[in-house]
Image (cartoon, helix red, strand yellow):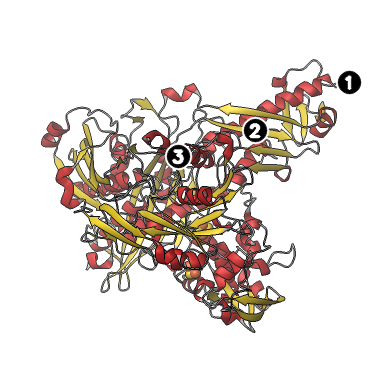
Amino acid sequence: MNAHAQPDSSPLGRPLDRVDGPLKVTGQARYAGEFNEGGLLYGSVVSSTIARGRVLSIDGAAAEAVPGVQLVLTHLNRPRLAADDDSYEDMDSAEGSAIRPLFNDRVLYSGQPLALVVADNLEIARHAASLVTIEYAAEAHQTDLVAALDQAHAAPAELPEPRGDAEAALLGAALSIELEYALPIEHHNPMEPHASTVLYQDDGSLLIYDKTQGPQNSQQYVQHVFLLDKEKVRILAPFVGGAFGSGLRPQYQLPLAVMAALVLKRSVRVTLTRQQMFTFGYRPRMLQRLRLGCTANGTLQAITHDAFAQTSRFEDFTEHVVEWSGMLYHCDNVRLGYQMVPLDVFTPLDMRAPGATEGVFALECAMDELACAAAIDPLQLRLLNFADTNQNEGKPYSSKELRACYAQGAERFGWDRRSMEPRSMRDGHQLVGWGMATGVWEAMQNPASARAALAADGTLTVSSATTDIGTGTYTVMTQIAAAAMGLPVEQVEFKLGDSSLPTAPLQGGSFTVSSVGTAVQQACTALQGKLFEVAQRLPQSPFAGAVLEQVEFVDGQLRLRESPETALAIAEVLAASGPLEAQADAKPDEKRDKFATATHSAVFVEVKVDEALGSIQVSRVVSAIAAGRVVNPKMARNQILGGVVWGIGMALQEETQIDHNLGRYMNHSLAEYHIPVNADIHDIEVIFVEENDDVVNALGSKGVGEIGIVGVASAVANAIYHATGKRIRELPITLDKLL
Amino acid sequence: MSATSLREGRSDPAAHSISLVLNGQPRQLDVLPWTTVLDLLREQLDLTGSKKGCDHGQCGACTVLLDGKRVNACLTLAVMLDGRDLTTIEGLANGDQLHPLQEAFVRHDAFQCGYCTPGQICSAVGLAREGRAQSRDEISELMSGNLCRCGAYNNILDAIEEALPATRGEGGA
Ligand code: FES
Ligand code: FES
């Protein structure tokens, strides 16, 4: 699995157990809403019940009369807040004006926080919050994407220029299809609800445990919105109970808890309820129209792909939805379009493989339909139109082992035993269907910093302000640092989740290993330089005439590559020098510029559909992944498994439904918003194909958080077509749509 | 992180005095009639290992063992603990010696974020006691009250399948 030659002892590529595993299985890992302190106050949020209008009055008298209530906070008695849009911007902002919680009387969506009741304990806060009455001047609202399609405007996104002449090519194509796909709203629903515990310090500064994918993002936000000095705000996030994008922007429990803490000069916690987890970002509802044209033998001649996505009235949320259709297959005539439809809803938010999940779904279903129309095996159609370069960018790939994904995935799945005809395979009263799809995601790298420090006892502590949202960051960074310094992993600790640590980008987009991992590696390299300098200056140093390039760090020693017996223990050097530390600020290498960089996958799915009942079971999945070097196969596999489970949920279950009369969600609970449970998930096999890449970063690693979900829902939909002969172009595919 | 001076409703006339065995230790507590076991554990006793994913009995993150049976702590009132034996995730390990299920969860990487994990493990301990799950499919079915949004289900099954015999052997809790 290792792309690069490593000494046998290197921890890179090993299936190390999670270093934070023992804390998690014993209940000792603490999440944002679990830091207790004597005298801590609890906030309960009162949410708007209308989708658009104004607050005429808020009556908090009954709540205030409840013994134990400390404060009913509204837009009328809140502390001073910044009044400019810039202050509310964060690292994942959408285009427009971010919401300002409790800023004024405007109601912009149903579920908007309008008051916070703060009390001595949770029960009192919750009870008192139910006593707050709000009078509104309601205005007409619109929450239905389809009804408002005529109000669409071009998305503020840079799309690839059209190439060739798609319209002419479609007219001239031997075969062409035109299709429309509909995707519903989905909510992230991490198991841990969003929470912020603000610990008010004696000097008036704030120590905040926040559920976030970027402690420095929350830090800046609080600093700017509340006009505070930088050193007055520190954010900690040692553990995050799942996020999937929901922690990429500061969510409203954070400013609400801070407001209460500043007003009362007390420590305050605000934890959202599961229902309130549906009152901020989500994957947007979307319509997509595709037209594909090909020659009689299946060679693609034209692609047009137009997406219409909902957004809020205050921000235009964009993601990369249609770009994939210009790069996944070779095609010389392509036109892409992306429109926004503003509604009286909250702004959508990045959610696991944002954009690709939706766009590739449509493209990969359409490719299956084209294969059927042309009577070609769906896998053959993909191979026939394989893209060796990224035509959107006009660049070759730094690496692209997608062919190996197709080959190994198909082999493991037994794809060659598939019959072409729909409804041609069965297992008793169940119709069996086999479908496949391609997945793709960008392999990005962002600037990041890390610090590496060797203590006198030889333990290495490496740190960066990233987070571990279940991705295995603690473990993987420990491995990268241990490998770089030639130390056993037990001697290495990685620190994260603290805004005061060296700068890290948001934990998201599958770029953490690439970005922070590179910084960790470079910090260790810098530390090696310092160790070597000291080693050279030791009396009778064996390295006196050597240069750093001749030295390697292995098994707790520095030694000459050419004559390994010339060695010195790191501990010996430290005994002379005392503790040493170094910091590195890593940037993407310029050599990336000439290349397109991406991860790829091939997903093969078997479904069984009960002929009489229409119930669907995804009985088997093979996901073959090309993501460069895998640092920890155990954790990487787990990421892919999770992505596949998400894809199955997307295909068959997930949908947040709105009652458009009220402009409000109807199924905002885990009983009614369905996600896969244990019994919904069957065999999933993950293959990592070998992919060498010395361009993406020095690790050769591309990240695996997103690629696992991309393509899965289309493979399921295609398998359902193969089983039943029915094309369902609207997710989720529930049994009522099949019968 | 301190558990000191957290309210246990002592001064409140509505409070009830209960005695229970909590993670092997006899405890006397004053609890309010509307307080759930989950809020008692998390907010008053600083035992935050039991998680709140929904507060409505819909996710299983709060699963604890009441007299050895798995229950949703969010749907159980604290006053009902009088005279009972309650085990939470904090009470499963024997000092530094992890429970076989805890060990198996680490070895099989049966979690990602870890937020559903205490509930999964307590639920699996309860499952072992019920003596019903004989096959992988049955384990899967009977563990379906414990949601994992990270989607670690295959690994959860591997861990439970492996540790179930050892868990049964020691009487389940
Ligand atoms: S918190 Fe008890 S079942 Fe969800
Ligand atoms: S491990 Fe994250 S919800 Fe199960």
Identity of the amino acid at label 1?
Pro
Q: Is residue B146 visible?
A: no
Q: Subunit of mark 3?
A: A
Mark 2 / mark 3, whichever is N-terminal: 3
Q: Label 3, on which residue?
A: A225
Residue A451: mark in rendering: 2
Residue A451: image x %, image y %? 65, 33
Residue A433: image x %, image y %? 31, 61
Image depth: mark 1 or mark 3 in front: 3
Identity of the amino acid at label 3?
Val
Residue A648: image x %, image y %? 37, 58
Image depth: mark 2 or mark 3 in front: 3
Q: Subunit of mark 1?
A: A
Q: Residue at x 27, y 52 (%)?
A: A54
Residue A539: mark in rendering: 1
Q: Is mark 3 within 8 Å of ligand 2?
A: no
Mark 2 / mark 1, whichever is N-terminal: 2
The reply to whether discs 1 and 3 touch (Cβ–Cβ < 8 Å) is no
Q: Is mark 1 within 8 Å of ligand 2?
A: no
